[in-house]
Image: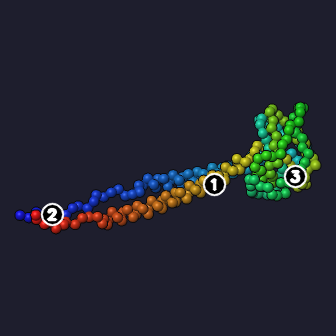
Amino acid sequence: MSDAIEPQPGAATEPIRPSRRWYILAGCLLAAAVACWSVAVIGMFSWDRQIQGFQRVPVPGEGTVTLTQPGEYALYLEARGACCSWMVGSQSGPLTSWSMRLAIAPANGGPKTLVHSWSGAPVSYDVGGHQGITGMSFTITQPGTYIVEAGHVYPPIVTDLAVGRDILWPTLLPLILLVAGFVALVGAVVSFVITAVRRRRARRRTANPSDVMSPGQWSPA
């Protein structure tokens, strides 16, 4: 009596790894990169509008500014400029060494407003014909119209004092978003390529299995 030995079937086909979900991740990263760049461009236009919207007083001279909200304001020393650049923490250039006599007081009368040298990171810009750098700051508790008087200005290239809010964060945000978008794009490309290569290798292994067992020889007891 003899027993027939049937060949053992090959191992069951396993799902191809990695999952297609990694393609979805790559797509999400690509969408995130596009979103970051889009918001960065919008931020650049907003930054430009903010600088163009500064209230300016010619120096040496006198002028009025209307401040609608209490809080801290920055004073930017400006010269004639071109377009377009900006820098954070700049300590070089013709506008970094300056001096002037300055007085700010409410137009309807009252004590003068204290003015301080800028204590934060200086921001310089050159946009829309305005080249400026943060120089001083002051704080008001009551909105209203204020008279600004400036004299004995040095260097003589200073033409205006611009009054507005601090532009440090509006300056940094587009740069941060541009970098974040680049990182997301690199992540999308790497995720897509690695997933495609590994799935191709997995399909080849499935098409040419090496673990199919052959029938062995049976020896009677």
Residue identifier under label 1: 178
Looking at the image, what colour scheme do you see?
A: rainbow
Left or right: where 1 falls relative to 179? left
Task: Residue 59 in the image: state x and y as whole percent.
Answer: 90, 48
Which SS class for mark 2?
loop
| Residue farthest left in this picture | 1
For the point 70% across and 47% down, the residue is 169
On residue 98, the disc is 3
For the point 85% across and 41% down, the residue is 115
User: If the image is split into quadrants, where does the C terminus sit?
Assistant: bottom left
For the point 67% across and 49% down, the residue is 173
Task: Residue 101 in the image: state x and y as whole percent.
Answer: 91, 45
Query: Do the CB atoms of the residues marked 1 and 3 lie less than 8 Å apart?
Result: no
Q: From the viewer's perspective, is residue 118 above or below residue 191?
A: above
Is label 2 or label 1 in front? 2
- Of 21 and 216, which appears nearest the observer? 216
Label 3: how many Cα within 10 Å (few below 14, some 14–19, many 20+): few
Left or right: where 103 falls relative to 208? right
